[in-house]
Amino acid sequence: GAEGSTLMSYFSKNQIQALKPKITFSTLRDLQCPVLQSNDLQGKAEESCSTEELFEWLGAVLNQVSLDNKSSSFLSTYCCPEPSTVVEKAFLCTITGFIIPEKIIQLLDQLCCYFGEPKLAHWLTLTVHGFADSPVSWRESEHGFHKGGENLYNFVIFRNLDYWLHMAVGAHDDCPP
């Protein structure tokens, strides 16, 4: 109707275009990483770390928090969970924008190439954040912003193609079954 044509003329006049996602790459050198076993979600003392420990570590890495537990740090005295190993080079790619589920599946497929030669990664991870103030969450519920607006899921994929899936939402949100 008239409303539709008015909207279209507004958009064409203002030349609104689809925003291309912004992509940034960085290489993290000598990164201390938790040791993981795909079949051990709880972790074992001196053998592997738990899913919760990994999730916390990942948050520190993605926010560029130092992992060396210095008492002089005003920001954080966090350190990598044990057991850990030092990875000479880790690759971090951040894509910011509106990304459809099909693209996320494509990204997962491409990431799995890092299990092949010559890279031979032991595990890799993909985190997908919703906007903190997004109006929707999973299922039928509105997304409750309240405090932090948590709204994300995280895949950890292992070389044998086992995977872990973390999901984090605010206390008032629905989560998939």
Image: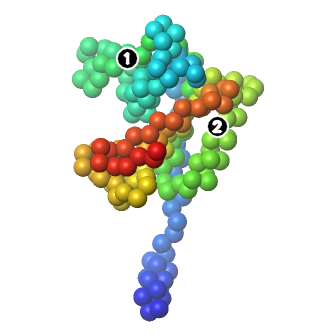
Q: Amino acid at mark 1?
A: Cys
Residue 145: tell me if it is visible.
yes
* Position of 54 relative to 111 (above/below): above
Q: Position of residue 7 (x, y in %)?
A: 44, 83
Question: Label 1 belongs to which residue?
Answer: 79
At horizontal 58% and vertical 23% (from top left) the residue drawn is 38
Q: Residues within 10 Å of mark 1 (few under 14, many from 20)?
A: some
Q: Amino acid at mark 2?
A: Leu
At horizontal 30% and vertical 18% (from top left) the residue drawn is 77
Residue 31: tell me if it is visible.
no
Q: Is residue 117 left or right of residue 99?
A: right
Q: Position of residue 176 (x, y in %)?
A: 45, 47
* Position of 60 relative to 108 (above/below): above
Question: Label 2 belongs to which residue?
Answer: 111
Assign a secondary structure to mark 1.
loop
Q: Earlier in the sequence, mark 2 or mark 1?
A: 1
